[in-house]
Image (cartoon, helix red, strand yellow):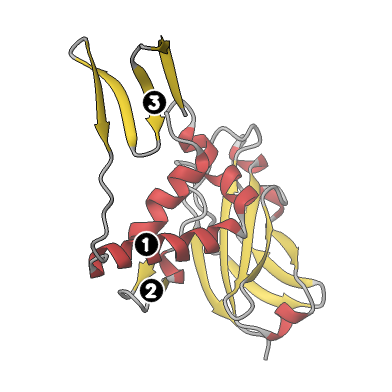
Amino acid sequence: MAILKNGIMGGVKGKLGNLVGYILNDQEVLRTIGINDKPLTNKQLNNKLQMKVIMEFLRSMDSLLETGFNPKAAGTKKNYHNLAVSYNKPHALKGFYPDVEVDYPKVVISIGDLPQPINPTVEFVTEGLKFSWDGAGISWPYSIDQVMLLAYAPESKTCAFKNSGARRMKGYDILEITPQMHYEPLEVYISFVSDDRKRAANSLYLGRIMNL
């Protein structure tokens, strides 16, 4: 949208069709926007595909990322989503156009300085997935940190997660999953967030598991 600053005889501020009006060195400038009809380079195509792949992946767990990246975003001009994308896009993808895919062991769902889970494990149980970790002897306030859990199914592109699960001192929690996920390979992750949501741990990848 363009604004006629002083009526039809005045300068234009903003965009009007392929024209853009703005102030440059106290002068009103009006210029055309060129149309780039050149085909995209392989590098540009790769960048577009990378963004599409990582956005589709992260979108399925948005509220989990909000918990995991909000502490890092606090006091900056970025939000949790910007941080999640800016970290995972360059680090958690592999391949080159047209074969870009998520590199699951390198995915990060939270960033921070809280202690990471100690000796974490995961196994299938009737209700879903049982995550365990060493919770004994943890001092306050770390003892009341809450666990963050994620299970992602690449085949169906579905996930299950908890962004505020059991306390660290409990030593385990159950993540409910869909019936279909019981029969798919799952990529699993664990982390912790503080009780006041102002701090988080660097998440850990626990591997790919399948219910045999």
Query: What is the quadrant of residue 134 in the picture?
Result: bottom right
For the point 68% across and 59% down, the residue is 161
Q: Identify residue type, mark 3.
A: Gly
Helix, strand, or loop for circle 1? helix
Q: Which mark is residue 48?
A: 1
C-alpha span from label 3 to label 2? 38 Å
Tell me the residue that label 2 is attached to: 100
**Residue that badge 3 annotates:** 14
Residue at disc 2, secondary structure: loop
Q: Which mark is nearer the camera, 1 or 3?
A: 3
What's the residue at 46%, 70% (across, down)? 104
Task: Determine the image quadrant of residue 2.
Answer: top left
For residue 60, say whether it is visible. yes
The residue at 49%/36% (across/down) is 79
Q: Is residue 31 left or right of residue 132?
A: left
Residue furthest left as drawn = 25
The amino acid type, in three-letter code, at marker 2 is: Val
Q: Tell which of 107 and 35 is nearer to you.
A: 35
